[in-house]
Image (cartoon, rainbow, N blue to C red):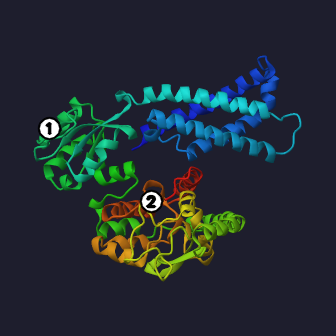
Amino acid sequence: MRFLYRIKQLIILSGDMVSYLLGFWIALTVRHLEIPSLETILHHANLFIILTLIWVIINYISGLYDIGYISHKNKQQRRAVETALFAFVAGIIYLYLRPSDSSVTPKTILALGIFAGYLISMLWRMLSLRIINIKTLQKRILFIGYTPEVIELLPILKTKGYCAKAILDKKDLTLEDKSIDTYTSVRAIRAIVNNSHIETVVVADHMQQQKEVMQELYELLFWPTKLYSLPEFYEDLTGRIPPCTFSESWFLAHLKNRETPVYNKWIKLVNLIGITSIGLCFILLFPFIALAILLTSKEPVFFMQERVGLGNKTFRLYKFRSMYALAKDGSAETKGYQFASKGDKRITPVGKFLRKTRIDELPQILNLCKGDISLIGPRPERPEIVEQLTGHMPYYPLRHVVKPGLTGWAVLHQNYTDDIETSLQKLQYDLYYIKNRSMLVDVSIMLKTINLIIRGLGQ
């Protein structure tokens, strides 16, 4: 479904690799004040190729291949400059860690290559985005059925390589976007597809119950047009499970027996890596963090709180204290439990830094060692909040069919959840992860979490 979107990403990625290699060629030319010979290029080739691959990975972590994000010119340029600095640091680290070779010590070439490579890359992106975002390269969509999910999708379609051309529903529609045609006759489906050059047809569940609609869609099976159900299309574009699918039968079909022996071994490996790396950071940073907390708030260094884990069982979660102790039990709540919110005044000055860098969660290495949580999974919630949300969302406890995690899919896609609506979105993200979790998804989450930490985007 997202083939065109992936092609766009591949185009930009390929251009980046060429840009960086060309940047190195320019760096060699400037450094030696002459066009480098083939022998000189080959002498540096292995080093430059490895550095180029490292930089592409750093670009991915920084979100430079997110088409929706980099389509914003100002954001793209600022992010590219920041990423170039990270790439330079990574290059220096690699040069010092690689086996010693006195004949290849290109510190100056590295700096010149970074500058030239990322400059060319930025120019390439400006050109390529103008090309790949033109309407002729956007897949035209016909929505059959107008639902809240369709309304939610319309604003984000263009960033994903799609363009809504028409909507068909049996009721009269009035849309703000006048470029989208509206229809009420089911018999017009094939005519719409033909006349508007529709490439993708997305069908809402309630429209699939109508015999006339299904007859028309059957005819489209013989046409070069792709058919998708609305839940499938929504899930692919948003990374969330749509609420319209929530039912016992759907959950049984998609959330049962999601684990395999290979994946279980993978999770054990990931957790071992997490315990080693996070444990080392905890040991190194603990004296400084503890001192900062005690000097600025005179509160206990650690904070423990009940959370709900696998199988609805509760456990104690450990964190560095980031809020003032306002109640007798050491919590920051004086009127019962409450959600944390953006700009929360209960957060200490040091706590703001700890939260943004997610350093406040380092003590959860203890929970990871005890097996309360996994490195990746839905973030564990408090029993009181779970009880409240379950009253509004009966399927909320389904988050607990897997172990909670130190980081997760919802953490990367959502800010604070301080009301029922955002909590529902969080559930949608969590169910998406449970349904689709795999080694590739886990690697993506780990890399993007690194970006979140480096850029101080924690909550």
Whether residue 292 sits left or right of residue 409 in the image: it is: right
Q: Earlier in the sequence, mark 2 or mark 1?
A: 1
- As drawn, the label of residue 361 is none
Whether residue 168 sits left or right of residue 80 in the image: it is: left
Whether residue 178 sits left or right of residue 358 in the image: it is: left
Element class at badge 2: helix
Query: How busy is the neighbourhood of tag 2: few (under 14 within 10 Å), some, or many (20 plus)?
Result: many
Q: What residue appears at the point 60 percent right and 64 percent down from the top-left corner? A: 266
Q: What residue appears at the point 52 percent right and 57 percent down from the top-left corner? A: 458
Q: Nearer the viewer, residue 286 or 137?
A: 286
Quadrant for residue 180, please give it: top left
Residue that mark 1 sits on: 188
What amino acid is at disc 2? Ala
Residue 91: percent from left, percent from top: 72, 41
Element class at badge 1: helix
How far apart marks 2 and 1 lie (CA) works out to 40 Å
Residue 371: percent from left, percent from top: 58, 76
Residue 323: percent from left, percent from top: 51, 69
Q: From the image, state whether disc 2 or disc 1 is nearer to you.
A: 2
What amino acid is at disc 1? Ala
Residue that mark 2 sits on: 410
Q: Is residue 357 above or below residue 114?
A: below
Residue 334: percent from left, percent from top: 40, 77
Which quarter of the rendered picture does the N terminus lie within? top left
Q: Nearer the viewer, residue 202 or 298?
A: 298
Q: What residue appears at the point 40 percent right and 31 percent down from the top-left corner? A: 133
Q: Nearer the viewer, residue 321 or 102?
A: 321
